[in-house]
Amino acid sequence: MKVELLYFDGCPGHEMVLPRLGELMARLGVDAPIELRPVESLEQAQRERFLGSPTLRVDGRDAEPGAAARTDFGLKCRLYATPAGLSRTIPDELLVEALAGGGA
């Protein structure tokens, strides 16, 4: 399994999600390294189909359902919809789903 956490240095979201991601991987028995991938230019964001920081990809698939259809790539902070409102971090439910093979 390939686990990638893409980020943009201007946004703190990846720093908040990284410890949670490690904990969830351990709980689920996922033994894979987390590859931290900085996105440093608009050109790279376009090439990488980067929707903002943080972005989690498992085996090349974005953790957020519907992300594959989006085209709003760029160097920006990413927000995730949760029942409590928008969040700067990836909700645990999406992390678990992606790690279990159910990512979008």
Image (cartoon, rainbow, N blue to C red):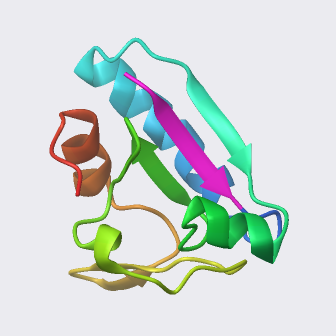
Nearest the eye: 15 or 76: 76
At a point 54% along the width and 19% down the height, the residue shown is: 33
User: Can you see residue 13?
Assistant: no
Quadrant assignment, res 80 = bottom left
At a point 18% along the width and 36% down the height, the residue shown is: 101
User: Can you see residue 99?
Assistant: yes
Image height of 60 relative to 90, above or below: above
Residue stretch rendered in magenta on the structure: 1-7
**Residue 12 shown left or right of residue 91 in the figure:** right
Q: Main secondary structure of the magenta part?
A: strand
Image height of 100 relative to 29, above or below: below
**Which quarter of the figure is the C terminus placed in?**
bottom left
Q: Is residue 16 magenta?
A: no
At a point 34% along the width and 61% down the height, the residue shown is: 91
Nearest the eye: 14 or 73: 73
Where is residue 74? Give x, y as percent. Answer: 66, 80
Image height of 53 relative to 93, above or below: below
Where is residue 93? Give x, y as percent. Answer: 22, 54
Where is residue 17? Give x, y as percent. Answer: 53, 51
At a point 40% along the width and 11% down the height, the residue shown is: 31
Where is residue 49? Give x, y as percent. Answer: 54, 67
**Which quarter of the figure is the N terminus placed in?**
top left
**Residue 58 shown left or right of residue 35 in the figure:** left
Report how many numbered discs are placed on residues in the image. 0
